[in-house]
Amino acid sequence: KQEVTQIPAALSVPEGENLVLNCSFTDSAIYNLQWFRQDPGKGLTSLLLIQSSQREQTSGRLNASLDKSSGRSTLYIAASQPGDSATYLCAVIGIQGAQKLVFGQGTRLTINP
Amino acid sequence: DTEVTQTPKHLVMGMTNKKSLKCEQHMGHRAMYWYKQKAKKPPELMFVYSYEKLSINESVPSRFSPECPNSSLLNLHLHALQPEDSALYLCASSQGLRFSYNEQFFGPGTRLTVL
């Protein structure tokens, strides 16, 4: 059974810092990995999707990497801003069984002005 | 346009009421999903529709009844709910179920309170 873990559960950093969020998964047989952000009480916003054959994806100040063999992904946020404060979730879709997203518990990020 | 819309934004209902949640997308996606999310937890999958047919039911109680009238619309009919069903209900869509590039796009959610 696929399990996804995100560490740390919460992170607080001063504005302007570069930071890395971590995601690990137990079964490397995945179709893709997706990073989301969620503001309190809101829906999920898709940030980046990395297919299993890719190593990284970039969008603006965000860069996500995927090391499928070790079951790890990182989300790098450059020059953090207070508006980046949110909960960040990673999720994978496995090749085996039903095609559904398996989520981590999320990292709650706070950027202090 | 990568928008999924959901109505209503908020819903308060009694345990004997019948209500429906609605979801709509115009991205030509053929897979649509219902998720339930409790506070400080990740979303939990409830149902998946693929080409307007129910593909996955995650053992959801029968008081939740999904419906997919056409490829753009997804409903969730609610009846005889319990207070513990209070949660944020999220709808999502994707191109399909059998694509490696299967990015899911989520709506803003319906905040449901059962009294």
Image (spheres, coloured by chain):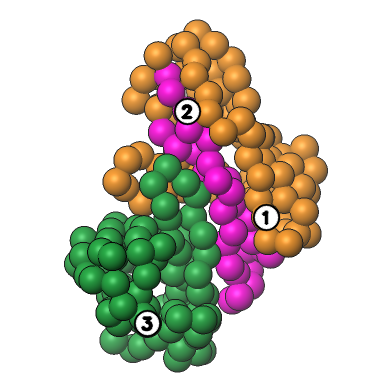
Q: Is residue A43 above or below residue B16?
A: below
Confirm whether residue A52 shows in the render: no
Which amino acid does the dot numbered 3 rest on?
A: Ala
**Any idea which chain is the orange one in this picture?**
B
> For the residue labelled by badge 1, is the local secondary structure a helix, a strand or a loop?
loop
Can marks 1 and 2 be said to lie on one chain? yes
User: Residue B86, labelled with which disc?
Assistant: none
Label 2 belongs to which residue?
Answer: B112
The chain holding disc 1 is B
Q: Nearer the viewer, residue A27 or A65?
A: A65
Side (left or right) of B101 relative to A13? right
**Any idea which chain is the green one in this picture?**
A
Which amino acid does the dot numbered 1 rest on?
A: Glu
Quadrant containing the C terminus of chain A in the rendered view: bottom left
Q: Nearer the viewer, residue B98 or A11?
A: A11
Label 3 belongs to which residue?
Answer: A78
The chain holding disc 2 is B
> For the residue labelled by badge 2, is the local secondary structure a helix, a strand or a loop?
strand
Label 1 belongs to which residue?
Answer: B3
Please report whichever mark, 1 or 2, sits nearer to the chain's N-terminal start. 1
Residue B16 painted magenta: no
Q: Residue B17: horizontal and vertical position, in percent? A: 54, 11
